[in-house]
Amino acid sequence: MTELRLQKDGSGTLPERIYARVVEGILRGDFGAGGKLPTEGELATRFGVSRPTVREALSRLRSDGVIETRRGSGSHVVAPGGGSPAPSTPPISSLADIERYYAFRSCVEAGAAAAAAEYRDAADLEAIRSSLDTLNEAMQGGQPGIEQDLRFHFAIARAAHNPFFLTTIETTVAPVRQFMELANSVTDKKSPERVRTVQAEHQAIVDAIARRAPHDAAEAVRVHVLNAKRRIFEKTRLI
């Protein structure tokens, strides 16, 4: 099987690298029905590390809400929002799959933003701005801000007043994005310049929605998704 992994460039502690490899395994769909992870011992053997190293990585995965431990059943993947992983979401197993994913994400999220610009009300706009403020605070505090970013994009989808956008983003776009960006964030510490760039991209989306400019909102999302793909590819390779 072709493996998707991050280019390590010598950065990151060993538990961080195991963390990233587990997240990449989730992206590939390696853990089967129900998203059950192998045992600590099995993971230690697979990665050629000690069980304490695996234990530390799993502890962080639990802390970040990626996995949960069920008594008598081991560790299982947790989908965004605490639901079950979407069984229809295809795994990511090649660079071509990443390209396809970002093309799909661009279409869905651009459509949602355009509809939000057309149909949003004052309460929707307040919710979008509030979620963006929370995301900005997380990023400025040095946090990955992945969950806050998801909530921001969910707020935009809700403002579209079209349940198909929200369901598609929640079940097919968000899970892949969460795990891909979690893996990328382990060894890719965001610089102040990168934080400012991402914040400007988000603000352009909100400004277009506030102006009720559907075309501008869709284009702002396309730019943001294109740049997000570029940032992922800067740290990703196949072996």
Image: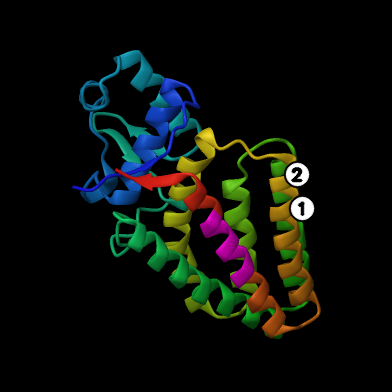
Q: Position of residue 179 (x, y in %)?
A: 44, 47
Tag 1 and tag 2, C-beta contact below 8 Å? yes
Q: Is residue 59 above or below residue 105?
A: above
Q: Is residue 37 above or below residue 204?
A: above
Q: Which residue is depicted at the point 29% across and 29% down?
A: 71
The one nearer the camera, 163 or 215, is 215
Q: Is residue 171 above or below residue 56?
A: below
The one nearer the camera, 198 or 75, is 198
Quarter occupied by residue 130: bottom right
Secondary structure beneath dot 2 equals helix
The secondary structure that most of the magenta stretch takes on is helix
Q: Indicate yes or no whether the magenta region holds residue 224.
A: yes
233 displayed left or right of 38:
right
Q: Which quadrant does the C terminus fall into?
A: top left
The one nearer the camera, 125 or 47, is 47
Give the class, few, some or many, for how many residues have Cα within 10 Å of label 2's Cα (few <14, many ≥20): some
Name the residue that disc number 1 marks: 133
Any mark on residue 26, and which? none
Q: Indicate yes or no whether the magenta region holds residue 29.
A: no
Q: Position of residue 182 (x, y in %)?
A: 49, 43
Q: Is residue 213 visible?
A: yes
Q: Which residue is depicted at the point 77% across and 53% down?
A: 133
Name the residue that disc number 2 marks: 137
Q: Position of residue 66 (x, y in %)?
A: 43, 40
Range of residues picked out in magenta: 222-230
